[in-house]
């Protein structure tokens, strides 16, 4: 009977672009999500699923927010769309730009809107190179990112990112991108003092700059906490040293706050948590809580003034840059966050509680490390704790654990063998209990699977 959902799952494999392993989708199908409220999703069979990933790190204020529906509806009926070209602007776009300038770290007071994190990062690449060209240094073109960093899926944003699997597909990276190792203490230097490791990992930037030639380097880009790259919390001193190296060589510092921004780390921005003073910042996801697509590039005086005073027209922009309906939803999202003090809630309440509950998992035979900040946490699985031996092939065990969590109706993501938890900021302590208990049960199930899984 082709009307059942089981058939629709299979049809999805034929007609829906599979953002996943095509063979797995064809064999197993996918669950159709039909409804959501708070931190819960419901599938087409009526089963409730706890969303431990806030969609994809975006639905910070939770699902089912009528305020956001109303904000969109009001704007849709008044002015659904207009653009920001040809001497026109819209009130929501102007208001959002100034709200973001107020919230952002000091100095980042100009917003350029885009529709996705990928587009925003792609925009930065042109902006940074145009900046150096206007400053009389067109040879400053190289952008240094980090291995396993993710900055988007456009060809340029994927080049800026350090995902080798992405580089292999589609013909390699564009020229003038370089990647240093990510500051992954547990992977590279479990026995080393974290502070010494922080200095060493930042030193990889200095080495790269020397190898490339400082006169050719335009910018360094990184997330405060590397998210899709495995939830890498920077070791102490890392960002201070990165900042110092960038200043020393007059290299622009780009901070990708697509995941870390809007409360995830327990401050409005990860830059504040780690005391980073970026020249440029990328925002997306939590900006509208995922209800509509919107992203922003925040730039400071240094770049803003050069682009404006020396540059004339910056020939760049998207049809939907500053889309008024998306801006209206973003403005209401920020209001909800302020009204409900969600950033403080992460910092003082649910963030510490999540880390406390996860801390107990350190005793689990499969768990090598528990790390996190605010309401973003990683639980890294390891084959042998005393020998510091990781699983090989990488990712198989993490994926199995993720599947157990999903079958147990909690969404927790696996990045290689790290289980990543990043629920909506409105999650309750009882829901955290449920999420961590389910992860624990799924780890037990995974442990039982090991002999056959790794055979
Ligand atoms: N930067 C980071 C840090 C991200 O995590 C993502 C998305 N996961 C992006 C950029 C790209 O954003 P988008 O998917 O909206 O293009």
Image: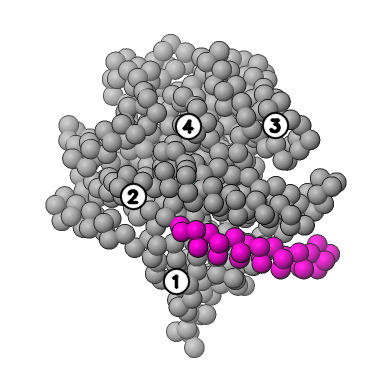
Instruction: Report whether residue 229 is seen.
Output: no
The residues colored magenta run 427-455
Residue 307 sits in quarter? top left
Judged by its main secondary structure, the magenta piece is: helix
Residue 316 sits in quarter? top left
Badge 4 element: helix
Dot 4 or dot 3: first in sequence order is 3
Q: Is residue 273 above or below residue 452?
A: above
Q: Position of residue 18 (x, y in %)?
A: 53, 62
Dot 3 or dot 2: first in sequence order is 3
Dot 4 or dot 2: first in sequence order is 4
Badge 2 element: loop
Q: Position of residue 39 (x, y in %)?
A: 44, 62
**Could you classify mark 1 by the number of other residues whose Cα lies within 10 Å: few (under 14), some (14-19), or many (20 or more)?**
some
How far apart are labels 4 and 1 at the CA level? 35 Å
| Residue pointed to by mark 3 | 194
Given residues 137 and 5, the one toward you in this image is 5
| Residue pointed to by mark 1 | 42
Badge 1 element: strand
Given residues 444 and 311, the one toward you in this image is 444
Kindly identify the residue that appears in the image at 67 percent across and 37 percent down: 184
Q: Which mark is residue 271?
A: 4
């Amino acid at each position: 009977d082709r009307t059942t959902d089981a058939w629709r799952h299979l049809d999805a494999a034929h007609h829906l672009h599979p953002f996943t392993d095509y063979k797995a989708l064809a064999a197993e199908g996918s669950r159709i999500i039909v409804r959501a409220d708070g931190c819960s999703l419901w599938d087409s069979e009526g089963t409730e699923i706890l969303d431990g990933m806030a969609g994809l790190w975006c639905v910070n204020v939770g699902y089912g927010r009528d305020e956001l529906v109303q904000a969109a509806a009001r704007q849709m009926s008044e002015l659904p769309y207009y653009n920001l070209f040809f001497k026109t602007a819209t009130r929501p776009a102007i208001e959002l730009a100034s709200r973001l300038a107020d919230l952002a770290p000091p100095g980042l007071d100009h917003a350029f809107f885009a529709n996705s994190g990928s587009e925003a990062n792609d925009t930065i690449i042109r902006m940074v190179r145009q900046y150096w060209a206007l400053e009389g240094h067109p040879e400053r073109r190289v952008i240094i990112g980090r291995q396993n960093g993710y900055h988007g899926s456009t060809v340029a944003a994927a080049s800026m990112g350090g995902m080798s699997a992405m580089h292999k597909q589609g013909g390699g990276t564009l020229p003038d991108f370089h990647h240093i190792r990510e500051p992954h203490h547990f992977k590279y230097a479990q026995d080393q003092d974290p502070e010494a490791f922080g200095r060493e990992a930042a030193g990889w930037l200095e080495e790269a700059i020397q190898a490339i030639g400082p006169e050719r380097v335009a910018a360094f880009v990184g997330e405060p906490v590397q998210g899709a790259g495995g939830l890498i919390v920077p070791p102490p001193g890392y960002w201070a040293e990165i900042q110092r190296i960038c200043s020393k060589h007059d290299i622009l510092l780009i901070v990708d706050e697509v995941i870390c921004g809007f409360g995830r780390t327990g401050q409005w921005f990860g830059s504040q948590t780690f005391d980073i003073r970026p020249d440029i910042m990328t925002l997306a996801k939590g900006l509208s809580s995922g209800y509509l697509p919107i992203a922003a590039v925040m730039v400071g005086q240094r770049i803003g003034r050069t682009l404006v005073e020396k540059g004339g027209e910056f020939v760049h922009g998207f049809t939907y840059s500053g889309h008024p309906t998306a801006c209206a939803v973003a403005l209401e999202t920020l209001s909800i966050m302020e009204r409900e003090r969600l950033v403080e809630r992460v910092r003082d309440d649910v963030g510490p509680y999540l880390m406390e509950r996860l801390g107990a998992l350190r005793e689990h035979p499969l768990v090598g490390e528990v790390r996190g900040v605010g309401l973003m946490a990683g639980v890294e699985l390891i084959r042998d704790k005393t020998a510091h031996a990781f699983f090989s092939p990488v990712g198989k065990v993490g994926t199995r654990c993720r599947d157990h969590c999903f079958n147990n109706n909690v969404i927790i993501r696996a990045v290689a063998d790290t289980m990543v938890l990043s629920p909506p900021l409105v999650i309750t302590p009882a829901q955290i209990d449920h999420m961590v208990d389910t992860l624990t049960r799924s780890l037990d199930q995974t442990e039982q699977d090991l002999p056959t899984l790794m055979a």
